[in-house]
Amino acid sequence: MDGLTVLVLAAGAGSRLAPAVGPRPKPLVEIAGAPVLVHNLRWLAAAGVRHVWINLHYGAALIREAIGDGSALGLEVSYLFEPALLGTAGATRNLDGAWRDQLLVVYGDNFARFSVTDLLAFHRHHPDPVSIAVFDPRRCANTGIAGGRITLGRGSRVKSFTEGTPAAGGGMVNAGVYVLDAFIRAATAGDGPLDFGRDVFPALLAAGVPMRGYEIDGFCLGLDTPASYGRALEMVDRGEVVLA
């Protein structure tokens, strides 16, 4: 995967989930016998990714201990520690010159499955600098957690992006995986925290920057609360989601 940089976001504390799982970092919450971060790294390795950057903040030492250098998962892992949280988009600033062409961003505390290879091919096939993996909550298994609500137009062009709306409200939902061309680096510049859903994507749309939504055919399980985590565990136990 020449020219592709991969950033897995794993800095958040997941405080809403703490009543169910205790003080462990949210990316280390277990599902289907392994931490969700381990599932995501195995998923990327199976897609042909060989090097991954992981940003850290809360529970950094625990995540380093769990993942190590990545070799056990078929990867080479580099870590980016944030003394203060930079947000999902602000985290890209620490990549410095590593983001030269395309950047694949994966929310490391989301549990999703679909073809990464097909997403990258979709992005290469279209001229727009941003591709957002999305799912239809009427078709794809999900835990009903609120996320960015996306309206798609002709040719899968993103018409609107609204953060924090319920998954039951209709339309497409942000699956937390993006492919971004280096053109987008300027939109993540600055000093303070910056979020893709709240800040960058709405600003790009307002500026007329075209983006596309790639509809996944797998599943996307948000694990943000004890209730959603419980639903995810039930889906796995009942075989409603397939990990292969």
Image (tube, rainbow, N blue to C red):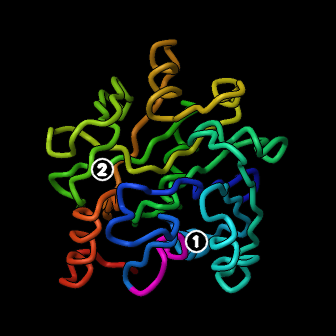
* Residue 185 to residue 218: above or below: above
Is the residue 40 above or below the residue 136 in the image? below
**Up-down: is 162 above or below 34?**
above
Residue type, mark 1 in image? Leu
Magenta-drawn segment: 33-39
Residue placed furthest toward the right = 97
Q: Where's residue 166, x and y in %?
A: 21, 41
- The three-letter code of the residue at mark 2 reads Phe
Residue 185 appears at what percent x and percent y? 70, 31
List the residue tagged with mark 1.
Answer: 41
Is 158 on the left-hand or right-hand side of 169?
Answer: right
Q: Quadrant of the C terminus?
A: bottom left
Which circle's residue, 2 or 1, is located before the other in the chain? Answer: 1
Residue occupying image coordinates x 30% and y 50%: 135
Q: Residue at x 60, y 58 (%)?
A: 58
User: At which x and y percent is residue 41?
Assistant: 58, 71
- Residue 204 lies left or right of residue 59; in this view the side is left
**Mark 2 = which residue?**
135
- Residue 90, picture quadrant: top right
The residue at 71%/59% (across/down) is 53
Q: Which residue is at a point 77% across and 46% down the rendered structure image?
A: 95
- The residue nearer to you, when weighing 225 against 202, is 225
Distance (Cα) linking label 2 and label 1: 21 Å
* Image location of residue 16, percent across then percent down: 36, 55
